[in-house]
Image (cartoon, grey):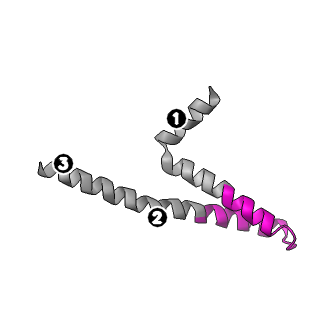
Amino acid sequence: MLMRQLIEWAKTHPRLAGWIVLGLGMNAIVLYEARDVGLQTGQWIALLVATTLVAGLCVWIIGWEDDDEAEAASTEAQKK
C-alpha cells in the first residue's frame, strides 16, 4: 500500500523524486568517501547541503530536454 503511494507520488512529481533519489545517492557517496577526512560538524553540513543542491541542479538541467520536447510537441499539435 505504502509502496504504491510512493510510486504514484513519484509519477506525479518526477523531478522532485529524482532530486531526492539522486541527492540521497550522492550524499551517501560523499559520506563514505569523506569519512576519514576529519571535517567538523559545520563543514559536514555545508558539504551535504552543497551536494544536495548540486543534485537538484543536475535534475533541473536534465529536465531542460523534457521541456524542449514538450514544447516541440505542443507546437506540432497547434500546426495541425
Farthest bottom residue in view:
37
> Which residue is depicted at the point 84% across and 71% down?
39
Q: Secondary structure at mark 1?
A: helix
Is residue 53 or residue 77 the one in the foreground?
Answer: 77
Q: Which of the labelled discs sits on residue 79, or is there none?
A: none
Give the mark, 1 or 2, whose residue is nearer the N terminus. 1
With 46 as the anchor, is 15 left or right in this view? left
**What amino acid type should be assigned to the residue bearing mark 3?**
Ala
With 73 as the anchor, is 58 left or right in this view? right
**What amino acid type should be assigned to the residue bearing mark 1?**
Glu
Q: Considering only vertical position in the picture, is 16 above or below 47?
A: above
Q: Which of the labelled discs sits on residue 61, or is there none?
A: 2
Magenta residues, as a range? 25-54
> Which residue is depicted at the point 62% across and 51% down?
21
For the residues labelled 1 and 2, the Cα–Cα distance comes to 23 Å
**What amino acid type should be assigned to the residue bearing mark 2?**
Ile
Is residue 9 or residue 80 the one in the foreground?
Answer: 80
Does the stretch in magenta take in 52? yes
The reply to whether the C-beta atoms of the residues labelled 1 and 3 are less than 8 Å apart is no
Displayed quadrant of residue 36: bottom right
Q: Is residue 64 visible?
A: yes
Q: Secondary structure at mark 3?
A: helix
* Residue pointed to by mark 3: 77
